């Protein structure tokens, strides 16, 4: 059969497609900008036809459909990352969270969660019968290897991205054509605090370095400060709109990379239509599975790898809390530790954790003597290297406990430094300065 016949024989309405799912199934779906919402909405409308279906996904941009009151007992939601719309449900037990490093997620899915069904978004097929997984290759690509039922929402808004995003129509069981604009994550204006943090981070990035940028408000502020650099490389789990101009201007040209020379390597993107358009048919950017992109041993193959991620709290030992506030699962581990470790192992590499010095409108210091009770350490004190706030840079690796604490107090907000010095005195029986 030529590809068109294969494709047409697998075309279905959403109502027909969801009949492939059975009560008791485990289903994995693509997340973020490529969440297959057209199919998911129909599945949720038919919730009464299903019992005990567990849906696993990651960071959802809009409503989490699986935690609606009426679907209780019909669907449950298991997330690798809490979002604004799933955080409360995870906290009150309606949904659940699975903790692991991002590079391990494909293995955890395959060997522990074992979904029978996978649902993802793809672009329409090209003239050779290949679709693209668009903005998300991450963990969803490998589900095509082991899930029994593979369903794709074919959406003309999904960009035709390159790398391992390209799949032949023969790899799927069912195609549902539904065109709808992708969920977007707009960039928010950069605050003065983020601008200052961006400048300090940029001062730690040299021409020719290979960078990774994390999630949250700070990455765009860093991108804005990189415009006088040259020959940067990009090997990152994810990026937002901030990288577009850096690539267009050739500031990121990947010319110094040891692996994937000349190419930007990503696992997924989190941005707007502007970014989707930029990725469309762009051979300079390759999307790869997360077990590859986030594998510390792969990350370390590029020299001068610099990872920049954000956090919620750092204690005076340098323990970094990035995804919990007490017992509240605020976000997820994501690829923070994967990249901290990969950058540390890279020849000439370094990791940066950047955060505003305060939270809650300046009422809470993010640098604290001890982490909040029940919070989980994301990046350990042994992994941490640079911590950056709007007040400067603290380099912690190789430092004694006293010197770490001193370095961190110096980049804390001035309103909290005296209290931190008192904590230092209580602990070390000598003045901090
Ligand atoms: N105590 C109490 N509240 C805190 C806090 C603290 N120590 N730190 C932050 N908050 C509050 C903030 O005040 C803010 O609330 P508000 O919006 O009501 O003011 C909220 O938590 C979010 O904080 P913010 O720092 O603005 O979040 P962000 O959007 O910049 O994201 C992380 C920062 C740390 C949550 C995000 O980077 C993350 O999830 N990291 C872990 C995963 C990771 O690094 N992955 C790597 C690449 S994906």
Image (cartoon, rainbow, N blue to C red):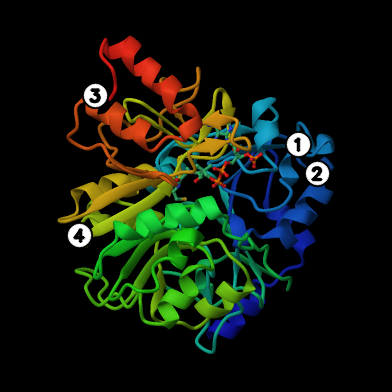
Query: Which residue is under mark 4?
Result: 301
Tell me how far mark 2 sits from mark 1, CA to CA. Answer: 6 Å
In the image, 76 versus 237, the foreground residue is: 237
Tell me how far mark 2 sits from mark 3, CA to CA. Answer: 55 Å
Horizontally, residue 433 falls left or right of residue 272, namely left
Q: Which mark is residue 47?
A: 2
Tell me how far mark 3 sits from mark 1, CA to CA. Answer: 51 Å
For discs 2 and 3, the disc positioned in front in the rendered view: 3
| Secondary element type, mark 1 | loop
Query: Which residue is under mark 3?
Result: 401
User: Which circle's residue, 2 or 1, is located before the other in the chain?
Assistant: 2
In the image, 372 versus 358, the foreground residue is: 358
Q: Is residue 425 above or below residue 362?
A: above
**CB within 8 Å, label 3 to label 1:** no
| Secondary element type, mark 2 | helix
Q: Tell me the residue at 38%/16% (across/down).
A: 423
In the image, 13 versus 119, the foreground residue is: 119
User: Which circle's residue, 3 or 1, is located before the other in the chain?
Assistant: 1
> In this rendering, does residue 310 appear at all?
yes
Tell me how far mark 4 sits from mark 1, CA to CA. Answer: 46 Å
Q: Residue 98 at x, y = what percent? A: 51, 34
Query: Which residue is under mark 1?
Result: 74
> In this rendering, does residue 144 appear at all?
no
Q: Tell me the residue at 53%/79% (across/down).
A: 278
Q: Residue 195 at x, y = what percent? A: 49, 57
Residue 300 occupies quadrant:
bottom left
User: Which circle's residue, 4 or 3, is located before the other in the chain?
Assistant: 4
Residue 24 occupies quadrant:
top right
Horizontally, residue 181 falls left or right of residue 403, namely right
């Amino acid at each position: 059969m030529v590809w068109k016949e294969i494709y047409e024989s697998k075309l279905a309405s959403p109502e027909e497609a969801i009949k492939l799912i059975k009560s008791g199934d485990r289903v994995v779906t693509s997340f973020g900008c490529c969440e297959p919402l057209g199919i998911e909405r129909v599945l949720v409308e038919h919730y009464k036809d299903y019992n005990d279906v567990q849906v696993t996904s990651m960071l959802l941009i809009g409503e989490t459909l699986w935690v609606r009151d009426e679907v209780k007992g019909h669907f449950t939601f298991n997330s690798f990352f809490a979002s604004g719309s799933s955080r409360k449900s995870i906290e009150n037990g309606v949904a659940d969270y699975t903790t692991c490093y991002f590079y391990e997620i494909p293995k955890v899915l395959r060997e522990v969660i074992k979904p029978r069904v996978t649902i993802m978004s793809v672009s329409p097929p090209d003239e050779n019968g290949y679709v693209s997984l668009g903005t998300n290759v991450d963990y969803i690509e490998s589900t095509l290897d082991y899930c029994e039922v593979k369903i794709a929402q074919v959406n003309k808004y999904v960009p035709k991205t390159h790398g391992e995003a390209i799949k032949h129509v023969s790899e799927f069981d069912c195609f549902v054509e539904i065109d709808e604009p992708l969920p977007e994550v707009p960039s928010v204006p950069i605050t003065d605090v983020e601008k200052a943090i961006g400048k300090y981070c940029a001062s730690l990035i040299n021409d020719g370095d290979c960078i990774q940028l994390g999630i949250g408000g700070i990455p765009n502020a860093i991108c804005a400060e990189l415009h006088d650099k040259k020959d940067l490389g990009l090997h990152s789990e994810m990026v937002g709109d901030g990288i577009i101009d850096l690539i267009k201007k050739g500031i990121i040209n990947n010319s110094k990379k040891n692996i994937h020379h000349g190419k930007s390597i990503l696992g997924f993107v989190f941005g707007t239509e502007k970014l989707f358009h930029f990725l469309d048919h762009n051979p300079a950017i390759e999307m790869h599975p997360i077990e590859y992109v986030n594998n510390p041993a792969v990350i370390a193959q590029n020299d001068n790898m610099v990872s920049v991620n954000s956090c919620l709290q750092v204690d005076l030992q340098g323990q970094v809390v990035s995804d919990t506030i007490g017992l509240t699962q605020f976000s997820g581990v994501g690829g923070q530790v994967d990249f901290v470790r990969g950058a540390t192992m890279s020849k000439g590499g370094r990791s940066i954790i950047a955060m505003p010095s305060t939270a809650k409108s300046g009422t809470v210091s993010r640098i604290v003597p001890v982490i909040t009770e029940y919070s989980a350490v994301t990046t350990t004190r042994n992994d941490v290297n640079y911590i950056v706030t709007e007040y400067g840079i603290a380099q912690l690796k190789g430092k004694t406990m006293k010197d770490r604490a001193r370095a961190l107090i110096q980049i804390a907000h001035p309103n909290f430094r005296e209290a931190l010095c008192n904590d230092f005195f209580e602990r070390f029986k000598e003045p901090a300065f």
